Image (spheres, helix red, strand yellow):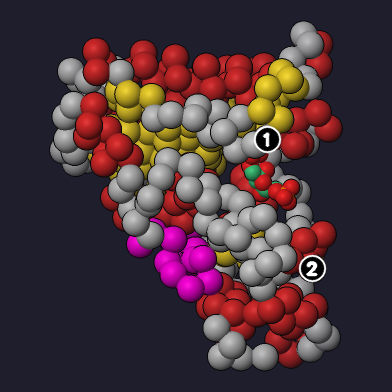
Amino acid sequence: MTTLDAYLDSSRGPDAADLAVLLRGMAGAGIKIADELARAALVGQLGTTGDTNVQGEKVKKLDVWANDVVVAALDATGRTCTLVSEEMEEIRHSPERCAGARFVVCFDPVDGSSNLDVNGIVGTIFSVLKKRGSGPDHARADVLQPGTAQAAAGYIMYGPSTLLMLTIGDGLHGFTLDRARGAWVRTLAGVRIPTRGRTYSINDGNFIRWPAGVRRFVEHVRAMDVATGRPYTARYVGSLVADVHRTVHDGGIYLYPEDAAGSGKQSTGKLRLMYEASPMAWLIEQAGGAASTLSARILDLKPTGPHQRVPLVIGSPEDVRMAEEFYADRRG
Ligand code: FBP
Protein backbone atom coordinates (compact mmCIF):
# COMPACT_ATOMS: atom_id res chain seq x y z
CA MET A 1 0.00 0.00 0.00
CA THR A 2 1.36 3.37 -1.08
CA THR A 3 2.25 5.82 1.65
CA LEU A 4 1.63 9.55 1.38
CA ASP A 5 5.40 10.09 1.24
CA ALA A 6 5.80 7.68 -1.69
CA TYR A 7 2.78 9.19 -3.47
CA LEU A 8 4.14 12.74 -3.09
CA ASP A 9 7.66 11.64 -4.13
CA SER A 10 6.23 10.14 -7.31
CA SER A 11 4.26 13.27 -8.24
CA ARG A 12 5.61 15.30 -11.15
CA GLY A 13 5.51 18.99 -12.12
CA PRO A 14 7.58 22.16 -11.59
CA ASP A 15 6.42 22.66 -7.98
CA ALA A 16 6.07 18.98 -7.03
CA ALA A 17 9.01 18.84 -4.63
CA ASP A 18 8.08 22.07 -2.83
CA LEU A 19 4.40 21.08 -2.72
CA ALA A 20 5.39 17.72 -1.22
CA VAL A 21 7.25 19.48 1.62
CA LEU A 22 4.27 21.73 2.30
CA LEU A 23 1.73 18.87 2.27
CA ARG A 24 3.88 16.77 4.58
CA GLY A 25 3.84 19.72 6.97
CA MET A 26 0.03 19.90 6.82
CA ALA A 27 -0.24 16.12 7.32
CA GLY A 28 2.05 16.36 10.34
CA ALA A 29 -0.19 19.03 11.86
CA GLY A 30 -3.13 16.65 11.30
CA ILE A 31 -1.46 13.96 13.40
CA LYS A 32 -0.89 16.43 16.27
CA ILE A 33 -4.51 17.60 16.10
CA ALA A 34 -5.80 14.01 16.05
CA ASP A 35 -3.73 13.25 19.16
CA GLU A 36 -5.01 16.34 20.99
CA LEU A 37 -8.65 15.62 20.08
CA ALA A 38 -8.31 12.15 21.59
CA ARG A 39 -7.16 13.53 24.94
CA ALA A 40 -8.94 16.92 24.94
CA ALA A 41 -11.43 16.02 27.70
CA LEU A 42 -8.59 14.73 29.87
CA VAL A 43 -6.52 17.93 29.65
CA GLY A 44 -9.27 20.56 29.81
CA GLN A 45 -9.09 21.41 26.12
CA LEU A 46 -12.85 21.27 25.53
CA GLY A 47 -15.10 24.34 25.76
CA THR A 48 -14.64 27.95 24.69
CA THR A 49 -12.00 30.62 25.27
CA GLY A 50 -14.62 33.32 25.90
CA ASP A 51 -13.57 35.17 22.72
CA THR A 52 -15.55 35.65 19.47
CA ASN A 53 -13.81 35.23 16.09
CA VAL A 54 -14.04 37.25 12.87
CA GLN A 55 -17.04 35.08 11.93
CA GLY A 56 -18.90 36.18 15.03
CA GLU A 57 -18.64 32.64 16.46
CA LYS A 58 -17.66 31.70 20.02
CA VAL A 59 -14.06 30.51 19.79
CA LYS A 60 -13.35 26.97 21.01
CA LYS A 61 -10.06 26.33 22.84
CA LEU A 62 -9.22 23.70 20.22
CA ASP A 63 -9.92 26.17 17.37
CA VAL A 64 -7.09 28.39 18.62
CA TRP A 65 -4.80 25.50 19.60
CA ALA A 66 -5.22 23.78 16.22
CA ASN A 67 -4.74 27.09 14.38
CA ASP A 68 -1.37 27.59 16.12
CA VAL A 69 -0.33 24.00 15.32
CA VAL A 70 -1.12 24.41 11.60
CA VAL A 71 0.60 27.83 11.41
CA ALA A 72 3.75 26.46 13.12
CA ALA A 73 3.79 23.36 10.87
CA LEU A 74 3.44 25.43 7.67
CA ASP A 75 6.05 27.97 8.83
CA ALA A 76 8.45 25.11 9.48
CA THR A 77 8.18 24.00 5.82
CA GLY A 78 9.59 27.33 4.60
CA ARG A 79 7.32 27.01 1.55
CA THR A 80 4.76 29.68 2.42
CA CYS A 81 4.71 33.21 3.84
CA THR A 82 1.01 34.00 3.33
CA LEU A 83 -1.69 32.24 5.34
CA VAL A 84 -5.46 32.66 5.68
CA SER A 85 -7.31 30.95 8.52
CA GLU A 86 -10.87 30.93 9.78
CA GLU A 87 -9.37 31.83 13.17
CA MET A 88 -7.25 34.78 11.96
CA GLU A 89 -9.02 38.00 10.97
CA GLU A 90 -6.22 39.35 8.80
CA ILE A 91 -4.20 37.66 6.06
CA ARG A 92 -1.00 36.61 7.86
CA HIS A 93 1.82 37.74 5.58
CA SER A 94 5.41 37.28 6.88
CA PRO A 95 7.87 38.99 4.45
CA GLU A 96 10.79 37.49 6.38
CA ARG A 97 9.59 34.03 5.34
CA CYS A 98 9.09 34.75 1.65
CA ALA A 99 12.56 33.76 0.39
CA GLY A 100 11.69 30.08 -0.33
CA ALA A 101 7.92 30.57 -0.33
CA ARG A 102 6.05 29.15 -3.34
CA PHE A 103 2.51 28.87 -2.02
CA VAL A 104 -0.35 30.54 -0.17
CA VAL A 105 -2.41 28.35 2.18
CA CYS A 106 -6.01 28.97 3.25
CA PHE A 107 -7.29 26.66 5.98
CA ASP A 108 -10.00 25.92 8.52
CA PRO A 109 -8.14 24.36 11.46
CA VAL A 110 -11.24 22.77 13.04
CA ASP A 111 -14.25 22.40 10.78
CA GLY A 112 -17.48 21.42 12.48
CA SER A 113 -16.37 22.84 15.82
CA SER A 114 -19.94 22.68 17.11
CA ASN A 115 -19.30 18.91 17.28
CA LEU A 116 -16.19 19.23 19.48
CA ASP A 117 -17.82 19.18 22.91
CA VAL A 118 -20.11 16.30 21.93
CA ASN A 119 -17.30 14.05 20.68
CA GLY A 120 -18.58 14.32 17.11
CA ILE A 121 -16.62 14.22 13.87
CA VAL A 122 -14.58 17.31 13.02
CA GLY A 123 -11.96 18.05 10.39
CA THR A 124 -9.26 20.34 9.04
CA ILE A 125 -9.74 21.75 5.51
CA PHE A 126 -6.99 23.33 3.39
CA SER A 127 -6.48 24.93 0.00
CA VAL A 128 -3.05 25.57 -1.53
CA LEU A 129 -2.57 28.29 -4.17
CA LYS A 130 0.58 29.18 -6.05
CA LYS A 131 2.29 32.38 -4.91
CA ARG A 132 2.38 34.65 -7.96
CA GLY A 133 3.81 37.98 -6.82
CA SER A 134 6.24 39.38 -4.24
CA GLY A 135 5.88 41.96 -1.48
CA PRO A 136 3.11 42.65 1.09
CA ASP A 137 0.89 44.47 -1.42
CA HIS A 138 0.79 41.32 -3.47
CA ALA A 139 -0.28 39.06 -0.59
CA ARG A 140 -3.98 39.89 -1.01
CA ALA A 141 -3.88 39.29 -4.78
CA ASP A 142 -2.10 35.98 -4.14
CA VAL A 143 -4.91 34.94 -1.80
CA LEU A 144 -7.88 36.08 -3.89
CA GLN A 145 -7.40 33.58 -6.71
CA PRO A 146 -10.29 31.48 -8.09
CA GLY A 147 -10.54 27.82 -7.10
CA THR A 148 -9.33 26.79 -10.56
CA ALA A 149 -5.88 28.11 -9.52
CA GLN A 150 -5.49 25.63 -6.64
CA ALA A 151 -2.30 23.53 -6.61
CA ALA A 152 -3.63 21.21 -3.89
CA ALA A 153 -6.71 20.80 -1.71
CA GLY A 154 -7.62 18.45 1.09
CA TYR A 155 -9.34 17.68 4.32
CA ILE A 156 -8.30 15.66 7.34
CA MET A 157 -11.23 13.89 8.95
CA TYR A 158 -10.94 13.04 12.64
CA GLY A 159 -13.34 10.11 12.92
CA PRO A 160 -13.02 6.49 14.06
CA SER A 161 -9.88 6.60 11.94
CA THR A 162 -7.96 9.68 10.89
CA LEU A 163 -8.25 10.12 7.12
CA LEU A 164 -6.57 12.60 4.79
CA MET A 165 -8.41 13.17 1.50
CA LEU A 166 -6.17 14.93 -1.02
CA THR A 167 -5.93 16.12 -4.61
CA ILE A 168 -2.97 17.66 -6.39
CA GLY A 169 -4.83 17.53 -9.70
CA ASP A 170 -4.52 13.81 -10.50
CA GLY A 171 -7.74 12.56 -8.92
CA LEU A 172 -8.99 12.23 -5.35
CA HIS A 173 -7.08 9.94 -3.00
CA GLY A 174 -7.53 8.96 0.66
CA PHE A 175 -4.74 8.22 3.13
CA THR A 176 -5.50 6.59 6.48
CA LEU A 177 -3.21 7.33 9.42
CA ASP A 178 -1.43 4.13 10.48
CA ARG A 179 -0.41 5.01 14.01
CA ALA A 180 1.73 1.88 14.40
CA ARG A 181 3.89 3.03 11.48
CA GLY A 182 3.35 6.75 12.03
CA ALA A 183 2.59 6.86 8.31
CA TRP A 184 -0.33 7.84 6.08
CA VAL A 185 -1.26 4.87 3.92
CA ARG A 186 -3.34 5.20 0.76
CA THR A 187 -6.59 3.30 1.33
CA LEU A 188 -8.68 5.11 -1.30
CA ALA A 189 -7.21 5.60 -4.79
CA GLY A 190 -8.87 7.53 -7.59
CA VAL A 191 -12.21 7.93 -5.78
CA ARG A 192 -15.24 8.37 -8.09
CA ILE A 193 -18.56 9.70 -6.77
CA PRO A 194 -21.74 7.98 -8.03
CA THR A 195 -23.39 10.13 -10.72
CA ARG A 196 -26.60 10.16 -8.69
CA GLY A 197 -27.24 9.39 -5.04
CA ARG A 198 -30.08 8.53 -2.66
CA THR A 199 -29.15 10.88 0.19
CA TYR A 200 -29.66 14.60 0.79
CA SER A 201 -27.90 16.59 3.53
CA ILE A 202 -29.11 20.02 4.69
CA ASN A 203 -29.89 21.70 8.02
CA ASP A 204 -33.67 21.20 7.98
CA GLY A 205 -34.01 23.67 10.82
CA ASN A 206 -33.35 26.46 8.30
CA PHE A 207 -36.32 25.40 6.10
CA ILE A 208 -38.17 28.67 6.71
CA ARG A 209 -35.20 30.63 5.34
CA TRP A 210 -34.47 28.53 2.24
CA PRO A 211 -35.00 30.07 -1.21
CA ALA A 212 -38.20 28.75 -2.84
CA GLY A 213 -36.27 26.65 -5.40
CA VAL A 214 -34.37 24.86 -2.62
CA ARG A 215 -37.64 24.08 -0.82
CA ARG A 216 -39.11 22.63 -4.03
CA PHE A 217 -35.96 20.54 -4.62
CA VAL A 218 -36.05 19.12 -1.08
CA GLU A 219 -39.77 18.40 -1.36
CA HIS A 220 -39.01 16.64 -4.66
CA VAL A 221 -36.35 14.31 -3.21
CA ARG A 222 -38.61 13.63 -0.21
CA ALA A 223 -41.55 12.60 -2.44
CA MET A 224 -42.39 8.94 -3.01
CA ASP A 225 -41.39 7.65 -6.47
CA VAL A 226 -39.68 4.30 -6.44
CA ALA A 227 -38.84 4.50 -10.14
CA THR A 228 -36.49 7.44 -9.49
CA GLY A 229 -35.20 6.17 -6.16
CA ARG A 230 -37.23 8.59 -4.06
CA PRO A 231 -37.68 9.40 -1.28
CA TYR A 232 -33.99 10.09 -0.61
CA THR A 233 -32.80 9.51 2.95
CA ALA A 234 -31.66 12.46 5.06
CA ARG A 235 -28.25 12.66 6.75
CA TYR A 236 -26.73 15.73 8.49
CA VAL A 237 -23.73 15.63 10.85
CA GLY A 238 -23.26 19.41 11.01
CA SER A 239 -19.60 19.08 10.04
CA LEU A 240 -18.87 19.93 6.39
CA VAL A 241 -15.99 17.41 6.31
CA ALA A 242 -18.18 14.56 7.56
CA ASP A 243 -21.18 15.43 5.36
CA VAL A 244 -19.08 15.90 2.20
CA HIS A 245 -17.01 12.77 2.85
CA ARG A 246 -20.16 10.63 3.11
CA THR A 247 -21.49 12.29 -0.04
CA VAL A 248 -18.27 11.60 -1.98
CA HIS A 249 -18.39 7.97 -0.87
CA ASP A 250 -22.09 7.17 -1.26
CA GLY A 251 -23.28 9.85 -3.69
CA GLY A 252 -26.09 12.30 -3.14
CA ILE A 253 -26.07 16.00 -2.31
CA TYR A 254 -25.11 18.42 0.48
CA LEU A 255 -26.69 21.86 0.49
CA TYR A 256 -25.97 25.00 2.53
CA PRO A 257 -27.93 27.63 0.58
CA GLU A 258 -28.14 31.34 1.26
CA ASP A 259 -31.10 32.66 3.23
CA ALA A 260 -33.91 33.88 0.98
CA ALA A 261 -34.14 37.66 0.76
CA GLY A 262 -35.50 39.14 3.98
CA SER A 263 -35.61 35.78 5.78
CA GLY A 264 -32.31 35.78 7.67
CA LYS A 265 -28.78 37.05 8.17
CA GLN A 266 -26.94 34.69 5.83
CA SER A 267 -27.95 36.32 2.54
CA THR A 268 -24.72 35.08 0.91
CA GLY A 269 -24.66 31.68 2.65
CA LYS A 270 -22.69 30.55 5.72
CA LEU A 271 -19.69 28.67 4.43
CA ARG A 272 -16.43 30.42 3.53
CA LEU A 273 -15.22 30.31 -0.06
CA MET A 274 -11.43 30.28 0.48
CA TYR A 275 -11.08 27.48 3.04
CA GLU A 276 -14.35 25.54 2.87
CA ALA A 277 -16.25 25.78 -0.46
CA SER A 278 -13.31 26.13 -2.88
CA PRO A 279 -11.16 23.21 -1.62
CA MET A 280 -14.23 20.96 -1.27
CA ALA A 281 -15.35 21.91 -4.80
CA TRP A 282 -12.02 20.90 -6.34
CA LEU A 283 -11.89 17.66 -4.37
CA ILE A 284 -15.37 16.67 -5.51
CA GLU A 285 -14.79 17.68 -9.15
CA GLN A 286 -11.64 15.52 -9.11
CA ALA A 287 -13.97 12.65 -8.15
CA GLY A 288 -16.43 13.40 -10.98
CA GLY A 289 -18.84 15.42 -8.83
CA ALA A 290 -20.10 19.00 -9.03
CA ALA A 291 -20.13 22.06 -6.74
CA SER A 292 -22.10 25.26 -7.26
CA THR A 293 -23.83 28.19 -5.61
CA LEU A 294 -26.88 26.93 -7.54
CA SER A 295 -26.27 29.60 -10.13
CA ALA A 296 -22.47 29.49 -10.62
CA ARG A 297 -19.62 26.94 -10.49
CA ILE A 298 -17.75 27.40 -7.18
CA LEU A 299 -14.31 27.03 -8.81
CA ASP A 300 -15.03 29.91 -11.24
CA LEU A 301 -15.93 32.41 -8.52
CA LYS A 302 -13.57 35.41 -8.30
CA PRO A 303 -12.97 35.87 -4.53
CA THR A 304 -13.56 39.31 -3.05
CA GLY A 305 -12.23 38.76 0.47
CA PRO A 306 -10.43 36.14 2.62
CA HIS A 307 -13.53 35.33 4.70
CA GLN A 308 -16.15 35.71 1.97
CA ARG A 309 -19.23 33.49 2.43
CA VAL A 310 -20.98 31.68 -0.43
CA PRO A 311 -23.89 29.25 -0.85
CA LEU A 312 -22.56 25.69 -1.34
CA VAL A 313 -24.35 22.84 -3.09
CA ILE A 314 -22.06 19.87 -3.70
CA GLY A 315 -22.31 16.22 -4.62
CA SER A 316 -23.27 13.83 -7.42
CA PRO A 317 -23.42 15.71 -10.75
CA GLU A 318 -26.99 14.67 -11.59
CA ASP A 319 -28.26 15.72 -8.15
CA VAL A 320 -26.50 19.10 -8.26
CA ARG A 321 -27.84 19.73 -11.79
CA MET A 322 -31.34 18.85 -10.58
CA ALA A 323 -31.07 21.27 -7.63
CA GLU A 324 -29.88 24.02 -10.01
CA GLU A 325 -32.91 23.44 -12.24
CA PHE A 326 -35.33 23.76 -9.32
CA TYR A 327 -33.47 26.89 -8.11
CA ALA A 328 -33.69 28.47 -11.57
CA ASP A 329 -37.38 27.57 -11.75
CA ARG A 330 -36.73 25.39 -14.79
CA ARG A 331 -38.33 22.48 -12.99
CA GLY A 332 -40.90 21.50 -10.31
P1 FBP B 1 -16.90 25.78 11.30
O1 FBP B 1 -17.28 24.82 12.32
O2 FBP B 1 -15.51 25.68 10.86
O3 FBP B 1 -17.27 27.19 11.65
O4 FBP B 1 -17.70 25.35 9.96
C1 FBP B 1 -18.90 25.62 9.64
C2 FBP B 1 -19.83 24.44 9.86
O5 FBP B 1 -19.74 23.96 11.16
C3 FBP B 1 -19.67 23.31 8.86
O6 FBP B 1 -18.74 22.36 9.23
C4 FBP B 1 -21.07 22.70 8.85
O7 FBP B 1 -21.38 22.07 7.65
C5 FBP B 1 -21.97 23.91 9.09
O8 FBP B 1 -21.14 24.93 9.63
C6 FBP B 1 -23.03 23.60 10.08
O9 FBP B 1 -23.80 24.75 10.20
P2 FBP B 1 -25.22 24.72 10.94
O10 FBP B 1 -24.94 24.42 12.38
O11 FBP B 1 -25.77 26.10 10.72
O12 FBP B 1 -26.04 23.68 10.28
For ligand 1, which image quadrant applies?
top right
Please name the amino acid that badge 1 sits on: Glu
**From what the image shows, is residue 181 above or below residue 330?**
above
Q: Quadrant of residue 110?
A: top right
Question: Residue 196's mark?
Answer: none
Marks counted in the figure total 2
Ligand 1 closer than 8 Å to the CB at disc 1?
Answer: yes
In the image, what residue occupies the spot 77% across and 61% down?
Answer: 206
Q: Earlier in the sequence, mark 2 or mark 1?
A: 1
State the extent of the magenta-drawn residues as a range: 284-300
Query: Residue 64: x, y in percent?
Result: 60, 20
Helix, strand or loop at mark 1: loop
Does the image show residue 122? no
Please name the amino acid that badge 2 sits on: Ile
Viewport quadrant of the C terminus:
bottom right
Q: Pick whichever, 192 or 323, lies toward us.
A: 323
In the image, what residue occupies the spot 61% across and 83% down?
Answer: 326
Residue placed under numbered mark 2 in the picture: 208
Residue 293 colored in magenta in the image: yes
Helix, strand or loop at mark 2: helix
Describe residue 171's horizontal placement relative to residue 219 as left or right: left
**From what the image shows, is residue 217 above or below residue 181?**
below
Q: Pick whichever, 136 or 192, lies toward us.
A: 136
Residue placed under numbered mark 1 in the picture: 57
* Mark 2 to mark 1 CA distance (whole Å): 22 Å
Q: Pick whichever, 15 or 51, lies toward us.
A: 51
The outermost residue toward the front is 262
Residue 288 colored in magenta in the image: yes
How many C-alpha atoms fall within 10 Å of the one at disc 1: few (<14), some, or many (≥20)? few
Query: Residue 84: x, y in percent?
Result: 42, 32
